[in-house]
Image: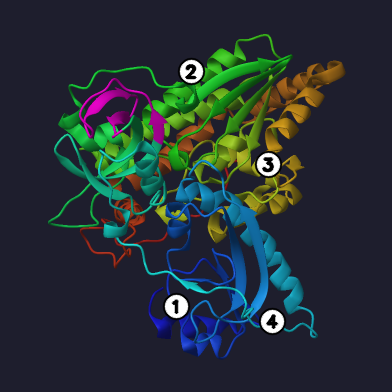
Amino acid sequence: MHDPQEIAAAAAATDPELIICPFLRRRVPDLVWRRYRTIIIHPGPEGDRGPSALDWAIMDAEPTWGVTALQATGDLDGGPIWGTRVFRMPSDPPRKSTLYNTEVSDAAMSLIGEVVTKAEDPGFTPRRQDRRVHVVVRPLVRQADRSFSWGDPTGHVLRRIRAADGRPGVHTELAGVPIAVFDAHPGDAAPGEPGTIAGRRQGAVLVRTGDGALWIGHARRLALEAPGTTVKLPAVLALGDGAGEVPRIAGPPHLREIGYRRVGRVGWVDFAFHNGAMSTSQCRRLAAAVRYAAAQDTAVLVLAGGEVFSNGLHLGVIDAHPDPAAEAWRNITAIDDLCRQIIACTGQLVVSALVGDAGAGGVMLALGADKVIARDGVLLNPHYRKMGLYGSEYWTYVLPRRAGEAEADRLTTDCGPITAAEAAEIGLVDRLAAPDRTAFPAAVLDYATELAADGRADALLRRKRETREADEHRRPLETYRIRELAEMSHDIFDDRHGFARTRRAFLTGRPLGPATPETLRLPDPRLPELTPVN
């Protein structure tokens, strides 16, 4: 919704007492803020103004940053203050998306709670902005502001790329291909011409800089004749033939997407996929890691996701494939195989650990475990409809068994996010950990160790096997998958609900636009009733 009149009409239809706007990309129409009390959550400290707050903060190496709740007025980012939070910036240049998903989002969630509390207090009056605070009006960051040369120092290039991650990336050229680059990490390479590719590992390429090298994990080809139509991909795929002759080399351990370790009776599988997207090959590699971990003589198996736990299918890899429907089918069956392995693991208790958000199939993957521990502040989006999909990952089994059929239907049809605290109230989360991200791994290990101690795991495993056997007798697990994939086949191959155009709009950041016979093959865009299978 971009038209000011549309926004004003939507507000009038709701007639709210309070409007909260987290991280706006456009101005609130005068018609709205003049009539309704409207609070802007600005991703910058008091005195910072402008649309590219985080980009400038990272590029300028700000030592501290903040988030401010202010009332919308005609003065952009200059209204009365409702609250503010200040935090130290990481010493290592953060990815913009990481900063947004961690310190900034945590501060914003805290501020939103404070704003709601203050709004309920009839005696509260927001304060005017402090005249002693230096006001910095920062312009929109453009590609010219982000530019670098591969001959520049590694730290300079790294900061430029991370300030544009996950959008819009920084325009450059590799192997003769004009691209936008993302997902940069320091690396080591033999001396050579800056801007040349020294090696590749999985989907990343190692690029020489003026004084070292950087791993570039993702890139987007620049289609100059039709800007904004290409999608972000693993760098090797984006470069195509340009990366074909590059040798495969081992990357540093901290860049591994999947790892395993054990602590006493607890086995721990780490996995961290860029923005939580899981391609066919990534699903298969994670399934292999889970098989390995399940074969060890531990009592508890922890599945610990990264900054984003998982968002399910890798829409970018699907969209860029010569046959997107065939790749989508391979991807969904690969993630289903992974989910079945988790659900059917009866030799160990499986714990999903969510330090970051999860969406769609990523939520259902987590719910396949016996226990779910999530950091307070995490958001879950347990639905598929907005992408034009029925969904799979055994959701018709794992969601109703925890939340009940009525709640499962509500979650998958309302298509709204829920907090980890709300998820705990309805049974989707078993243990809520404190918001502190740095303390979360220790909290997970304590929880897993507690489950493994004093024969508790043995008793829980006996109950798990009994429950799984009873569920299998009532309805074989495979039938849930068959039913879900039957529905998904229509969504993927018939495109009955516009999966192709919705996916492309999501990946390119462009408006969805109206459905046409070319973009929606069937005339009825309504999804079928998502009644869980009993």
Residue 480: mark:
none
Q: Earlier in the sequence, mark 1 or mark 2?
A: 1
**Foreground: 385 or 295?**
295
What residue is rendered at 52% in x and 76% in y?
A: 77
Circle 4 crowding by C-alpha within 10 Å: few under 14, some 14–19, many from 20: few
Report whether 239 appears left or right of 91.
left
Quarter holding the C terminus is top right
| Secondary structure at numbered mark 2 | helix
Q: CA distance from mark 3 to mark 2?
A: 24 Å
Say which amino acid is labelled 4. Answer: Arg
Q: Earlier in the sequence, mark 3 or mark 2?
A: 2
Residue 127: mark:
4
Residue lying farthest right? 454
**Foreground: 518 or 375?**
375
Q: Earlier in the sequence, mark 4 or mark 3?
A: 4
Tell me if residue 226 is in the magenta stretch. Answer: no
Report whether 132 appears left or right of 204.
right
Give the vertical position of 203 relative to 76 (above or below): above
In which image quadrant can residue 36 be found?
A: bottom right
